[in-house]
Image: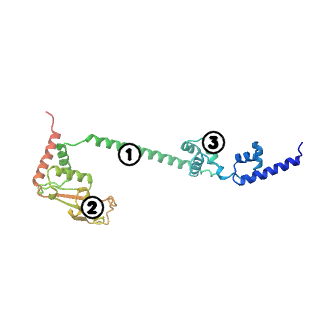
Amino acid sequence: MAHPQSKYADFEELRERAVALRREGHSLRQIRDELKIFNNDILNQLVKGEPPPEWTKRPRAKDDLRERARELRLQGWTYDRIEAELGCSKSSVSLWVRDPPKPERRDPAEQAKLAARKRWEHELAVRDEERRRTKAAAAADIGTMSDRELFIAGVALYWAEGAKDKAYRRTEVLHFINSDPNVIRLFLRWLEFLGVQRERLTLRVSIHETADVAAAEEFWADIAGVDTAALSKATLKRHNPRTVRKNTGDTYHGCLVIYVRQSADLYRRMEGAWYGIVGAATRQPD
């Protein structure tokens, strides 16, 4: 029978060897094979207090989830929200975030306001999507335009927005001004359809004097498909300091004025066509 002191000495010798191997960077498996110690309890006792080498540490698969959970908790999220967001169990969430301080409880009235605001934001998003779908469907319904449709559209556009001849002021000439780029594009396309050459057009910008005139001229020249040198001198509107203008900022480009020289005949045809449209639309069926 072995003496107890002998057993103790043997253990201490094994421990010294195990610790030395551990500090050299050996894993438990390597120490076990080296010392022929196949009892896990004894093996763990031999290296007790010695940290494992870095290379033996495996990253935990849930480390990223744990860090994300802690971030959300610090932002005030509840366990239920974190569980739903990360797709993990509530028990895991509770374990991961027990260190961070609990978020302050919001006042019930404040919570109700927050919930109402979120519902309204959702409602606005739904309405915006409905608007977008409706407009897209309506645009698709138009398809291609015939020459007749383009002519009628141009006549109606001019009569709504263009200058008109008056009995007290004979001005039979096509003279158009607008701030909407798409309206300008359609009007120019209508003139092209009527056979009006670009050389017959006088183009100029009309804009408030406090705006960026040069930028506006570049904008409208691009819309009209001409060089800025082709534009006549801009018309500047005086600024009234008592007036609070809303048409300011980078999106404000003023208006483009289009004057068609030698267009008396075209004007008469346009006015006649307009009254023809009105008559056709309001005529009672036989």
x then y, percent, for residue 22: 72, 52
Residue 88: quarter of image: top right
Residue 62: quarter of image: top right
| Residue type highlighted by circle 2 | Glu
Alpha-carbon span between mark 2 and mark 1:
32 Å
Nearer to us of marks 2 and 1 is 2
Residue 179: assigned label: none
x then y, percent, for residue 100: 62, 52
User: Residue placed at 26% from the left, 51% from the top?
Assistant: 182
Q: Earlier in the sequence, mark 3 or mark 2?
A: 3
> Compared with residue 27, is residue 168 higher up or lower down, i.e. above or below?
below
Name the one closer to the observer, 258 or 12.
12
Label 1: which secondary element: helix
Q: Is residue 272 visible?
A: yes
Residue 218: assigned label: 2
x then y, percent, for residue 51: 71, 52
Name the one closer to the observer, 8 or 167.
8
Reading the image, the residue beneath label 3 is: 91
Q: Quadrant of the C terminus?
A: top left
5 left or right of 54?
right
The 10 Å Cα crowd at callout 1, few under 14, some 14 to 19, many 20 or more, is: few
Number of marks: 3
Q: Quadrant of the N terminus?
A: top right
Label 2: which secondary element: helix
Reading the image, the residue beneath label 1 is: 128
x then y, percent, for residue 140: 29, 41
Name the one closer to the observer, 267 or 85.
85
Alpha-carbon span between mark 3 and mark 1:
40 Å
